[in-house]
Amino acid sequence: MGRTFFITTLGCPKNVADSRQMHRSLLREGYEPADSPYTADYHLINSCSFIESAREETIQTVLEGADIKKEHTGQKLVLVGCFAQRYETAVREELPEVDLSFGTGLYHRTGEILTEKFGAPALHNPLEPSVFSGMEYGGEPYAPVKLSEGCDRKCAFCAIPSFRGSFRSRDENEILEEIRELTASGVREAYLVSQDTNAFGGNPQKILDLIARMHEIPDLHWIRILYMYPDARTRRFLEGWDPQALPKLVPYLESPVQHASARVLKAMNRAGNREQFAELFALAREKVPGLEIRTSLLLGFPGETAADIDEVHAFLDECKPEKLALFAYSPEEGTSGFSLSGMPDENSTADMINEVRDHHLSLLKDIHLARENQVYECMVDEISPDGMVVRRKQDAPEVDEVIHIDAAEAGVLPNWSELVPGDLVSARVTGFFEYDMSGELLGLATPTGRGGSVGDAATVTGGSHSGSEEASR
Ligand code: SF4
């Protein structure tokens, strides 16, 4: 049996962080990364089971993995993560293509588990590059970092606590060590994820203290915090957030409200109401200049009425979140919502979602208009002979807007093509599409530490502005 592996990751950024833990465990045990599942001896699928569509995607991916396995004699297919944990018996009985499956608590032991099951990996050939040459993860300048595992809340629609277990904070030193390793491999933005971020350390001040310690890591440019449950703990976090003292913490709040009607939120067993969310988001914008907000809404919960949807529209008008994720409710086995009656018709929920999306797009147009001609500090995400893709501090990787700068608009820096992902630049927004923007490069935002060879011609000092804050109110 060979020793190469490939990990296919499904689901949310938390799964991306878990896959990285699997990757590290496999490297430690002597396994080596392969370029694709077609060339790997072990194909690991890190699964998701959050909602129906995620489960279907997992099953589809396993079936595709089974086809790949047929073409690669001896390959082992390994199913890991939420789906494997939740449907352990069904995986064993109904997916015979899967050679090994295990749940969410064992990511850090992936290498040992493979060795226990299939025998030791073949010895490393010293003439080949070191196994640790594969430590770079994907090459993106950003990476999710987990703060905790599990969740003690009991949202009526969510089965996550049933298979991720109760809430446990991660050791601070381990988190910092992981970020140091990531920055050594080129990562410049760490975004902090978990099921319930504001519960870290049992006190919001602990998160601020941890973020302060992250500021001591020299090559880490940006820190972003995700999944802040909209309650009193997030309010205390915001009250303690001093942007001057924590300049690497980007002006961004991701706080999923899930609904705006107090009645539906109560039925969902969630905290808050429209007025409280408006206060929380106003506090965030007041404390942190230029801050932008991402939230999510789950529509079609049992008992939801047209009046509840009116509350959602009023919430959008009041809070004007710059980014919005919309989901349709699907009943999950093992949750308190599963047996509730009065679920709105599927088609009417789809119509509601379209209406809410159109409403948000109309708000986004004004938000975009206010961003035009503004100058932002941005991170280079991608670079090619045709130009580059950069991202503002106010936009999270993979999910939010980016700015496209074509080669002609980058010419202010004669050697712009020598920039690398993770470099900071200053860019002006010149236009927008439905979500993304177009822009022009103005120069470097901060020294890149590479002798100024790229930016000498037109180095400028960047810095995000508060124009978008005013526009979004
Ligand atoms: S906070 Fe609610 S939705 Fe989020 S993981 Fe916990 S139970 Fe699920």
Image: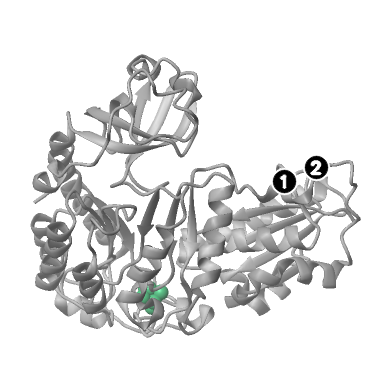
Kindly identify which numbered label has been placed on residue 47.
none
Residue at image point 44% right, 23% down: 454
Q: Nearer the viewer, residue 473 or 36?
A: 473
Residue at image point 43% right, 58% down: 216
The answer to whether the residues at label 2 and label 1 have Cβ atoms under 8 Å apart is yes
Q: For the residue carrying disc 1, how many other residues have a C-alpha within 10 Å: few (<14), some (14-19), or many (20+)?
A: few
Mark 2 highlights which residue?
Answer: 129
Residue at image point 49% right, 82% down: 162
Mark 1 highlights which residue?
Answer: 133
* Mark 2 to mark 1 CA distance (whole Å): 7 Å
Q: Secondary structure at mark 2?
A: loop
| Residue 344, x across and y down, in percent | 26, 69
| Residue 229, x across and y down, in percent | 29, 72
Q: Secondary structure at mark 1?
A: helix
- Figure coloring: one colour
| Residue 102, x across and y down, in percent | 68, 73
Q: Is residue 218 above or below residue 175?
A: above
Q: Which image quadrant for residue 456?
A: top left
24 relative position to 76: left or right: left
Quadrant in which ligand 1 is drawn: bottom left
Q: Nearer the viewer, residue 221 or 433?
A: 221
Q: Is residue 130 above or below residue 429?
A: below
Kind of residue sitting beneath label 2: Pro
Extreme residue in the front direction:
451
128 relative position to 98: left or right: right
Kind of residue sitting beneath label 1: Ser
